[in-house]
Amino acid sequence: MDTLPSTWVPAIWGGVQPESDSEAEADDFYQCLFELYNSVMSAMMAGDYEALFYEHEAEGETFTSVDDWCSGFMRGMELWGPLPAADNRVVDAHLEEVRLFGTETGSQQWDDMSTCLQFFITPVPAA
């Protein structure tokens, strides 16, 4: 499914075209953007794509945040528009985890699972 840059570029910026101070700055931005786009598309076509997740450190531990990537991916999926039924089945089979972290419904499911898991791992005081 091909989605034109005129559709997805504004979506990155909340529905508007990004502003720049000069034509040269805009050209540099779009050159970098399309180099990244082409790199991602080449990796996907070769089956070598790996998502880039945000990592941060706190209190000596490294945490990986997948929520933002998954949310952005799901927003991008919305740009595709309706898919044929056969494509929907294939896409749905591969998106369960992405939906868990990238949608409101998935977030609620994650919260429910976490609460349930907490119940099973909380130690019971000795009698």
Image (spheres, rainbow, N blue to C red):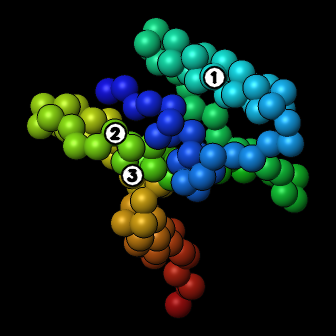
Q: Residue furthest toward the bottom?
A: 127
Rendering quarter of residue 54: top right
Q: Residue at x 76, y 26 (%)?
A: 27
Judge depth for marks 3 and 2 and give the one in front.
2
Q: Give the labeled residue for mark 1.
A: 34
Q: Nearer the viewer, residue 31 or 92?
A: 31
Q: Is residue 39 above or below residue 106?
A: above
Kind of residue at disc 2: Trp
Residue 111 percent location from the top left of the image: 46, 70
Q: Label 2 crowding class (10 Å Cα cut-off): few <14, some 14-19, many 20+? A: some
Kindly report the distance in space between the C-alpha atoms of the residues bearing marks 3 and 1.
26 Å
**SS class, disc 2:** helix
Most extreme residue toward the top is 46
Q: Nearer the viewer, mark 3 or mark 1?
A: 1
What residue is shown at x 55% (from left), y 54% (from top)? 15
Instruction: Name the residue type under label 3.
Output: Arg
Proximity of marks 3 and 2: CB atoms separated by less than 8 Å: no
> Residue 94: which disc?
none
Inspect this view and state whether residue 26 appears: yes
Q: Is residue 114 above or below residue 37?
A: below
Alpha carbon of mark 1 to alpha carbon of mark 2: how far?
A: 19 Å
Q: How far from the left and from the top, in percent, is residue 104?
A: 42, 66
Residue 67 at x, y percent in the picture: 56, 53
First in sequence, mark 3 or 2: give its number. 2
Residue linked to disc 3: 99
**Residue at the spot 84% in from the left edge and 57% down from the top edge:** 58
Q: Nearer the viewer, residue 84 or 25?
A: 25
Instruction: Identify the disc placed on residue 80.
Output: 2
- Secondary structure found at label 3: helix
Residue most extreme to the front:
23
